[in-house]
Image (cartoon, helix red, strand yellow):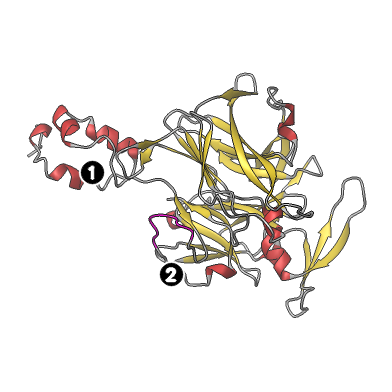
């Protein structure tokens, strides 16, 4: 017999049912079913939490609420360059690129580093000279250089994103990687033995982020040029969207990093992360400076006129950026009966700085869009290696 008097459901059952709702949006709807449920359930569910910060090294820096996961490989020897759908994507010193579910220890290997499009030779027995890489410089003939496996592991891949969880058995599953000195885009599918490059009408992109959006792939480069990639034809081309006109400095690499995110309404957001250099030792030399994030600017793409429009708030949403697939989340609980919203969770994905092993990896925190303040997770650190990243369900 159908149950049609929802308000008569025993009140002690409501929290037990609510624990199985992993989305804050579903929880709000559940609570709004009737007045009785609304009164008997807390405004903020403590079981719905935000992104998990994965710190792949022994940490004694006072971070609260630790949960230790034993991974199948030493995390200090893996450099993670991506995460999404509950999976981490790491690169080993041997050049293996592996997707790992840290909760189940299931793993899937993607094509190795040696098959990325600009690596022309790989000789694992040539110590300190394992890789030969083609270098393309604008308006000049291509050349090659020889480098070691440590350089390739830490520097060659800037970011990897995936289109879906491999557990979904989706035949359209793809992994995308920003790779090489020129930060080009390459693709692989499950079962591929090598990475495949895109042909483009521009020799140099210097991509900073990529996103799967409305059946296509979009990227944003160092100069805020908006690029569309077609995974069917493996081609890419510039989309004529002017740079945001409220700040001419947005195009400079040394002050900004850019991300692309689809919000909960389906709009495309451009997130510009600003950072500045600071001196961390008196009478310091060339390497005695480090950087910290100072601000984020957010823009929304107006498709009707193909322009970026500045927005001051993301409403009840939370943005998450770094090595992870750039993501917009619904509000969640902070564990103290408060909603977390209108903020940006960020980790440090400046590969170039981290590679020098003097500073980098430390720039991790939360930016509040409402009052433009930053909560830094590691305020007394200038170098964390390997860098932390977000684990996203």
Q: Main secondary structure of the magenta part?
A: loop
Q: Where does residue 257 sit, x and y in percent of width and height?
A: 66, 41
**Quarter of the image holding residue 255?**
top right
Q: Residue furthest bottom?
A: 125
Residue drawn 66% across and 50% down?
350
Q: Give the structural element (helix, strand or loop) at label 2.
A: loop
* Residue 214 shows up from this direction: no
- Looking at the rendered structure, the number of numbered marks drawn on it comes to 2
Q: What segment is highlighted magenta in the picture?
A: 61-67
Q: Where does residue 115 sit, x and y in percent of width and height?
A: 70, 64
**Quarter of the image holding residue 387?**
bottom right
Residue drawn 53% across and 29% down?
267
Q: Nearer the viewer, residue 335 or 322?
A: 335
Q: Nearer the viewer, residue 275 or 34?
A: 275
Q: Where does residue 197 sit, x and y in percent of width and height?
A: 71, 52
Q: For the residues carrying marks 2 and 1, which lies nearer the camera in this image?
A: 2
Q: Which mark is residue 18?
A: 1
Q: Which mark is residue 9?
A: none
Q: Residue furthest front?
A: 282
Where does the N terminus fall, quadrant-wise? Answer: top left
Local crowd at mark 1 within 10 Å, few (<14), some, or many (≥20)? some
Q: Nearer the viewer, residue 98 or 366?
A: 366
Residue drawn 56% across and 68% down?
76
Q: Which residue is mark 2?
A: 70
- Mark nearer the N terminus (2 vs 1): 1
Question: Could you tell me how far apart the alpha carbons at marks 2 and 1 are, in whole angstroms?
Answer: 30 Å
Residue 65 located within the stretch drawn in magenta: yes
């Amino acid at each position: 017999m159908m149950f049609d008097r929802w308000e008569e459901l025993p009140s002690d059952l409501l929290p037990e049912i609510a624990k199985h709702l992993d989305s804050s949006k579903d929880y709000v709807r559940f609570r709004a079913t009737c007045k009785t449920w609304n009164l008997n359930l807390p405004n903020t569910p403590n079981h719905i939490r935000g992104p998990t910060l994965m710190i792949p090294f022994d940490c004694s820096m006072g971070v609260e609420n630790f949960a230790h996961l034993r991974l199948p490989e030493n995390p200090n020897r893996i450099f993670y360059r991506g995460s999404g759908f509950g999976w981490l994507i790491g690169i080993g010193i041997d050049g293996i690129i592996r997707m790992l579910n840290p909760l189940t220890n299931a793993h899937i290997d993607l094509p190795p580093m040696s098959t990325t499009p600009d690596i022309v030779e790989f000789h694992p027995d040539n110590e300190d000279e394992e890789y030969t890489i083609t270098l393309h410089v604008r308006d000049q003939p291509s050349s090659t250089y020889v480098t070691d496996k440590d350089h390739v592991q830490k520097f060659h891949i800037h970011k990897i994103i995936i289109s879906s969880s491999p557990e979904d058995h989706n035949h359209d599953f793809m992994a995308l990687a920003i790779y090489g000195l020129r930060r080009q885009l390459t693709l692989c599918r499950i079962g591929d033995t090598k990475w495949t490059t895109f042909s483009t009408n521009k020799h140099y992109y210097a991509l900073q982020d990529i996103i799967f959006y409305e059946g296509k792939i979009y990227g944003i480069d160092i100069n805020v040029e908006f690029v569309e990639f077609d995974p069917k034809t493996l081609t890419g081309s510039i989309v004529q969207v002017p740079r945001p006109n409220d700040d001419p400095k947005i195009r400079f690499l040394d002050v900004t990093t850019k991300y692309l995110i689809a919000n909960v309404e389906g709009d495309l957001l451009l997130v510009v992360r600003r950072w500045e250099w600071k001196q961390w030792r008196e009478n310091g030399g060339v390497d005695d400076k480090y950087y910290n994030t100072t601000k984020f600017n957010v823009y929304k793409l107006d498709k009707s006129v193909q322009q970026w429009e500045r927005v001051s708030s993301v409403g009840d949403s939370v943005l998450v950026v770094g090595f992870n697939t750039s993501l917009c989340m619904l509000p969640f609980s902070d564990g103290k009966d408060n909603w977390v919203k209108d903020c940006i969770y960020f980790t440090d994905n400046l590969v170039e700085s981290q590679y020098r092993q003097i500073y980098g990896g430390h720039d991790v925190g939360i930016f509040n869009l409402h009052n433009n303040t930053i909560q830094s997770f590691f305020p007394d650190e200038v170098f964390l290696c390997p860098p932390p990243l977000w684990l996203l369900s």
